Amino acid sequence: MHGKVIEKSIPELIEELTAHYNEDGQQVVTHLEGLLYSNYVKYWDYIRLESLLTLQNPRTAYPDEMVFIVYHQITELYFKLVMHELNQVKTTDTITAAIFLKRIERCNWYFGQLINSFEIISVGLDQDQFLKFRVALNPASGFQSVQYRMVEIACTDLINLVHNDMRDKYDDYSTIEELFEELYWKKGATDTKTGQKTLTLRQFEEEYSNKLVQLAYEYKSRNVWSVYKRLSLEDQANETVKQALKTLDQHINIDWPLMHYKYALVHLIKNKTFLEATGGTNWKEYLPPRFQKVIFFSALYTKEELENWGKKWVEKEVISKIQAAKQG
């Protein structure tokens, strides 16, 4: 039909509506009569625009704090979209390679948008304003994004999120609770001098640990990697599927944390001195992928790719920035 939309007649629509409502024991006449009294849908009501625009509440008078808040709210909404796709991967019982690929590609689009727009705050923010209003945000930190932790758990086996130094001490028989205590990001919010958890980490664990452990149980056999391994061998060998997974892996574990690292290099180096992050997180050790070696789908990479994880990005974007900052 060359894409032409076929309009149904009113009697045809009435017949289909009647069958639809009859399935639930409803009278179609009642629902049609209800349309006489209902209002038209308005765009601003549908997306709750007025409510949305009240959710930005800066703690200081510096104008760029509004940019900072809005961008992070947008980030969390994109994370929600990613989890929406990953949840469908989890709940679809007989998922095909085509549907699986579609979900992963959507996740890549969402992360791609975040990564490509990060310069809004990494470059766009006025540094003097940022260094002042950030003080008012302690001990809050982007480290406390629970949705980002949820995305990690939904993608891979939990042991892959254990800190690189501790990973060899655990195996497939380790409990989720045991693994959870050794997740890599906890080291990033631990005081390197005292070994004590920062307030940022303690608050986060108190609020979300139980939720994240429960989520880990839900995704234990239904995370992205587990679902991929249940595809046919032919589908697993499909280069398009494999590349989509590698792109997702690299977006989450290289590009996204290193965007934050690049941002830190712009805003947290002053007079050739590294400033502390809000919440006391150890950003210099926590953000670089070469230190964490968090890789969701390691079986898809060559030995050389694993050994050089994140190295090219660091050489291009990070080392050059550090050298430039120290020079002047």
Image (tube, rainbow, N blue to C red):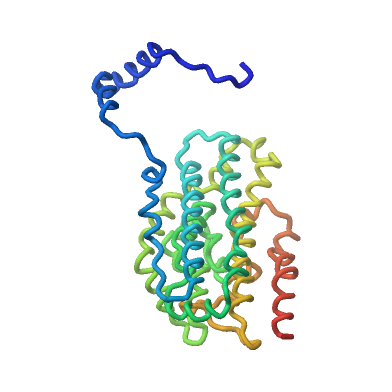
Q: Residue at x 60, y 62 (%)?
A: 118
- Which of the pair 326/205 is nearer the observer? 326
- Which of the pair 111/200 is nearer the observer? 111
Q: Residue at x 59, y 53 (%)?
A: 113
Q: Residue at x 48, y 71 (%)?
A: 65
Residue 105 visible to an observer of this rendering: yes
Residue 179 visible to an observer of this rendering: no
- Which of the pair 143/118 is nearer the observer? 118
Horizontally, residue 227 falls left or right of residue 279, namely right
- Which of the pair 312/233 is nearer the observer? 312
Instruction: Check the image and report above or below for 30 versus 267.
Output: above
Q: Position of residue 28 (x, y in %)?
A: 28, 19
Q: Position of residue 289 (x, y in %)?
A: 63, 67
Q: Quadrant of the C terminus?
A: bottom right
Horizontally, residue 18 falls left or right of residue 154, namely left
Instruction: Check the image and report above or below for 121 versus 104.
Output: below
Q: Quadrant of the N terminus?
A: top right
Quarter of the rendering containing residue 322: bottom right
Q: Position of residue 264 (x, y in %)?
A: 59, 74
Q: Position of residue 321 (x, y in %)?
A: 71, 76
Instruction: Check the image and report above or below for 57 versus 26.
Output: below
Figure label count: 0
Instruction: Check the image and report above or below for 32 versus 281.
Output: above
